[in-house]
């Protein structure tokens, strides 16, 4: 395998590039976190709207979801960077000019809208799994819509939507690479491309890239699994985090220890 | 009205509230309920006075649950009017037209009504205590401290003083239903709707739950609309029994009369079938 013959030199190149690569990595992390946060907000808002019994609320949500799921992220980015500014060119002084000139914000917005539209389906579908009896109990207690959503319905759907949202978030992480078509956004993939020049594509993309993205995705997934375990435990299904992380599983038999540990975890989580 | 003494009732039952000039707590006027083409209730008229406890009996599908759900605004009223304390709950007549009442007015009336469901419907994402205090604090605006105190005394009353921090999923069916009763009572309802609250329970815990409801009946003045297959319980607590069939009231009267000496053949047949099993 002569590919690997040059790898000692390549690691030297990697070292020289490390600063830029770390900058790229930070950009990718920022895009993933901020884009993911926006996607979550978009998903919740559109998902709630899409689950509304009123056609006037559901209809627009469906149109927006289908539209942004239908057009590719690349096309969306292209429009936002090259077409949207034309409006500001034609009408100088229009508010929001700072936004259309900020490619980083455009990247985040495009990621957020695109993945948010997918996430909306996960949110809507999970909300439908909350039983009718739960909704009726909230009506019998005269809870307002925002109140029942925030305190009763959404928390129950939450545990179920986490796995889908995790998938989408990992997709968003990888999809964030596409943002490098935007001038001035030097994300990890962009810098990997630079690293490719003194090395080769196997080293830069297939090795450094693979490892970096894999680790990032792993961290996201682990974080979301913690959220899921916590959410399930809150619903009285599954052990508490402390039990899961307990070094000696026998010290905390899942059934016997539940009441005590649960209360302790609850008290901690509560405030 | 004379009331026979019953050994299972701790305190003697007070006389049925007189249906005098006082505004009825619940009034159905020409109520009609359709599901699509299926007319479930037709031209239904009845009133319930303050503090009165009324049991609805009748064969399956006769519309008993539907009546309770209409009062709780869980079903849309397709015709007629329902009044709570004399105020229209869902629709009112204005200039000869039937128009919906505002959401705000409906909510104000709805907070006076509580319901206990067959399937308990406790919130699994909250502890027992949180289940009970959630609505008093956030719907009625009670101070948290008062709500917690009240919740503890209600848990005492339903025999679960040590379950405040438990999760609903860790409780048995009977315990869950007792929490559900406490949760409904925490709102201090004027009207309590009970729809077959013991039907999903193991036979050996049915008695406990019914005893708690007997005590609520004896110690409070809450108006109750009850659907149950427990005829003994119905006889003990109710001032009035209404027999439904085909969406209409076939016969109504004092439980002693309905259960021992029903006039209508439909009632006789129904009771024969139900009591025959006991
Ligand atoms: N959501 C619904 N959609 C369509 N039809 C319904 C619905 N709910 C009830 N019905 C119909 O209304 C009729 C009355 O139902 P309801 O549940 O009020 O009867 P019930 O007297 O409570 O019977 P049971 O003793 O079996 O509980 C039935 O024919 C039922 O099929
Ligand atoms: Mg029923």
Image (cartoon, coloured by chain):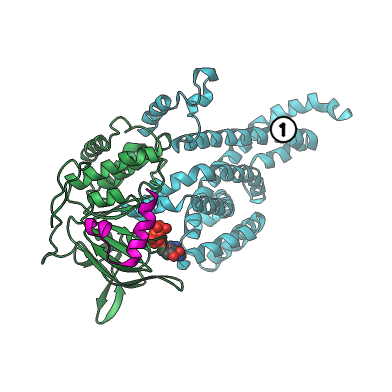
Chain colours: A cyan, B green
Point out the image quarter for the N terminus of chain A: top right
The answer to which image quadrant residue A33 occupies is top right
Whether residue A143 appears in this view of the structure is no
Count of labels in the image: 1
Determine if the magenta segment contains residue B186: no
Image position, residue B56 (x, y; %):
30, 59
Q: Is mark 1 within 8 Å of ligand 1?
A: no
The residue at the far left in this view is B21
Image position, residue A231 (x, y; %):
48, 38
The residue wearing badge 1 is: A208
At 84% from the left and 27% from the top, the residue drawn is A4
Question: Chain ID for label 1?
Answer: A
Q: Nearer the viewer, residue A168 or B74?
A: B74
The answer to which image quadrant residue A224 occupies is top right
Whether residue B97 appears in this view of the structure is yes
The answer to which image quadrant residue B73 occupies is bottom left
At 23% from the left and 50% from the top, the residue drawn is B237
Secondary structure at badge 1 equals helix
Q: Nearer the viewer, residue A37 or B207?
A: B207
For the stretch drawn in magenta, the main secondary structure is helix
């Amino acid at each position: 395998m002569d590919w690997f013959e040059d790898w000692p030199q390549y690691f030297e190149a990697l070292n020289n590039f490390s600063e830029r690569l770390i900058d790229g990595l930070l950009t990718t992390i920022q895009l993933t976190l901020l884009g993911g946060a926006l996607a979550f907000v978009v998903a919740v808002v559109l998902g709630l709207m899409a689950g509304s019994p009123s056609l006037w609320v559901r209809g627009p949500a469906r149109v927006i979801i289908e539209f942004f799921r239908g057009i590719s992220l690349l096309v969306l980015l292209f429009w936002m960077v090259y077409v949207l500014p034309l409006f500001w060119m034609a009408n100088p002084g229009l508010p929001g000019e700072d936004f259309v000139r900020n490619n980083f914000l455009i990247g985040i917005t495009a990621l957020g809208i695109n993945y948010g539209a997918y996430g909306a389906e996960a949110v809507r579908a999970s909300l439908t799994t909350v039983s009718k009896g739960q909704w009726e109990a909230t009506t019998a207690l005269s809870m307002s819509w925002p109140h029942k959503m925030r305190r009763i319905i959404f928390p129950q759907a939450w545990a179920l939507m986490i796995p889908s949202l995790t998938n989408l978030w990992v997709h968003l992480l990888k999809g964030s690479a596409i943002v490098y078509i935007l001038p001035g956004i030097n994300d990890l993939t962009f810098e990997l491309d630079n690293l490719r020049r003194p090395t080769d594509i196997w080293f830069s993309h297939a090795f450094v890239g693979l490892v970096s993205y894999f680790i990032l995705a792993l961290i996201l997934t682990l974080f979301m699994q913690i959220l899921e375990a916590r959410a399930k435990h809150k619903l009285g299904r599954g052990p508490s985090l402390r039990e899961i992380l307990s070094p000696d599983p026998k010290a905390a038999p899942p059934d016997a220890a539940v009441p005590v540990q649960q209360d302790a975890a609850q008290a901690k989580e509560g405030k | 009205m004379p009331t026979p003494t019953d050994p299972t009732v701790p305190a003697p039952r007070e006389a049925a509230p007189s249906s005098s000039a006082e505004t009825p707590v619940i009034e159905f006027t020409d109520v009609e309920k359709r599901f699509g083409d299926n007319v479930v209730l037709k031209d239904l008229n009845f009133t319930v006075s303050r503090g009165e406890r009324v049991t609805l009996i009748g064969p399956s599908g006769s519309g008993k649950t539907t009546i309770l759900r209409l009062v709780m605004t869980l079903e849309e009223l397709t015709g007629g009017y329902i009044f709570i304390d004399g105020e229209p709950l869902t629709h009112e007549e204005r200039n000869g037209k039937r128009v919906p009442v505002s959401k705000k007015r409906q909510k104000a009336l709805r907070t006076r009504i509580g319901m206990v469901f067959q399937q308990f419907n406790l919130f699994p994402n909250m502890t027992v205590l949180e289940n009970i205090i959630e609505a008093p604090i956030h719907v009625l605006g009670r101070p948290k401290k008062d709500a917690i105190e009240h919740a503890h005394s209600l848990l005492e009353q339903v025999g679960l003083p040590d379950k405040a921090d438990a999760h609903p999923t860790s409780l048995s069916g009977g315990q869950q239903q007792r929490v559900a009763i406490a949760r409904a009572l925490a709102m201090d309802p004027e009207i309590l709707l009970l729809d077959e609250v013991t039907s999903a329970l193991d036979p050996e815990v049915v008695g406990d739950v019914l005893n708690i409801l007997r005590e609520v009946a004896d110690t409070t003045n809450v108006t109750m609309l009850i659907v149950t297959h427990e005829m003994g319980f119905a006889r003990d607590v109710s001032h009035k029994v209404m027999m439904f069939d085909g969406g209409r009231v076939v016969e109504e009267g004092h439980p002693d009369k309905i259960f021992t000496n029903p006039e209508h053949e439909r009632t006789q047949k129904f009771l024969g079938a139900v009591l025959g099993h006991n």
